[in-house]
Image (cartoon, rainbow, N blue to C red):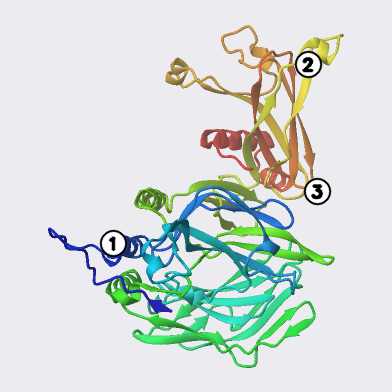
Amino acid sequence: MKKTRYYPFERNRYFYGKLLTVRDFESEQKYFNDKRRMMNRLLHGSGVLTGLQVVAVDDKSVSVEMGAAIDALGREIVVPTPMTLKLSMMDGFSNNEYAKNVYLCIAYDEKDKEPVHAVANSSVRSDEINDYNRVLESYRVFIREDAPDPASLPLANLSDQTVVLYQDSKVRVLQTTPRYVNPGQLFEMKLRFEKTLKAGRLSFQYELAADRVEAMDGTTIAFQEPQDEPDSEYEMKVLLRADSTASVKSTIGVQQGSAVLKLDDRQLDIQAQAVGEVQIIPTSVHEKLMNDFVKQSLEASLEAPTEPCIYLAKICLIKMGATYVIENVEQVPFGEYVYNSSVMYRLGQTSQYREDTAGQFVTKSKVKTLAPGQPPEFKVNYNKAISELSFDLSIPAGGGSGIAGILSGVADIPVEPFTKIAVSPFGRATKSFFSGEIAHGLGEGNVLIITSLEESSGDAFSDMLSSGDRVYGGASDVFKGSEFEPDAPEVKIGTIAYPQKGTFRIGVKVQQTSEPMNVRVRWWAYSAEMASTVRSGGDSIEDALSAAMREAASAGSGAE
């Protein structure tokens, strides 16, 4: 690492009759360049500003789109036109092994241009009397075959610490832990596995060595690469809890001699010595991180690699005979991006919107009736993908319905338009429609199902007279031609019960209709035990059913 000193800043002081030399003009350029580059580093950071996407154009070549970036020394890199590059022709690409991951990098570069005759040089350098009139601020693109040290990436250790547990030409295992946590806080340790596609199936197991940290799922950490759809990167999260003691330091790593890392059946020699450090602090983690950032020294803020570059893409290669092919291209694999102020403002608004809507759920509830004597059940399910919270309540029959063994509900049966010709050219134009299977909630065994046609007029005047909701029992055509005639066409209702499944199905036969509609059928179900209970009490089944039907209809209770 080197510390680039842009300061102190010196600029030319002009006065009448001053003799200007090459040094003065170079100082003038350096003054403005150094100031701009220092502000680039401190205000914006380094990374891709826009564009510079890397796309595979064939099995051995990639295209780099036009774009702009800022390197770790604050220098601007501009690619004005797209370019196509063959990997084997690029600097840094070796042919010793084709099954590997390589990294496409871009770095700032300067090129002299416009050679001119230099009169002054002829007196001191007789063999070289030409010089260049311009300096072109340009770039160079090259290949690096080794992944970078995580600590060398911009702001790598600002909020997290990443250590390398194992690394060779085919596999790299990284461990990432937060820098700070609060006492008793749950936090995640991330294990990242990077491998070549054809290296073999990866498995990793070890005993966690942690001080002042508790693993919530045990100290044995195990990872097994999935068999289907192999990938070159995987991430595993381990849930940990910090000690309740504040102002202490915790270490997290691999217990010596416990690590087993395999590619298929081949075991790799792993001697994991690196450990991560987590500080347990009593104050706000967010405030501590911000204080660390703003209080660091100027030289630490301007620290940069000796030869800074930006990793534009990770290119996964697989061996194909005596050569290679490009299998996959991953854009900016280490997240080296620079976001301008307008983008950050927009992202802040989006974050605020998400915070405002966080915790808001779509809730759904379902009530189900169990057979008499069964214990009640209550289940809560949360679907994170759609923010849906569902409650399933199961209540045994007889618990609060007034009469045990009797249940009621409604079924809406959709009726599609049809014509006489479509059904039959002879006779009356009627067609049957059926509901799905309905669980009556009385369990297995024989039940009696009684049905009736239910209508809701939706008319304000009828609602005032309390006659908007109507339940027709028996043959509804009795009221045909009167003021009580149903709105639906003539309907015949039938049922099928499935004693072994505890379900039944409702069918309706309707006359010709030209508009889609729903036929609502209210049903009542009572069990065989209900019949014996009623008879022993001296009441008729009809009286008991009538009472239950009145109570269920008034309560509007339903069982699914």
Say which of marks 3 and 2 sits in front: 2
Q: Which residue lies furthest to the bottom in this view?
A: 257
- The amino acid sitting under disc 3 is Gln
The picture places residue 540, in percent across and down from the top left corner, at 67, 37
Cα separation, mark 3 vs mark 2, equals 32 Å
Q: Which of 345 and 449 is in front in this view?
A: 345
- Above or below 384: residue 3: below
The amino acid type of the residue labelled 2 equals Thr
Task: State yes or no: discs 3 and 2 in contact (Cβ < 8 Å).
Answer: no
Residue pictured at 27% horizontal, 63% vertical: 31
**Residue underneath mark 2:** 430
> On screen, 455 above or below 117?
above
Q: Determine which residue is flagged by label 3.
A: 500
Which comes before the other along the chain, label 3 or label 2? 2
Confirm whether residue 296 shows in the render: no
Percent coordinates x, y for residue 455 in the rendering:
58, 23
At mark 3, the secondary structure is loop
Taking 380 as reference, is 269 left or right? right
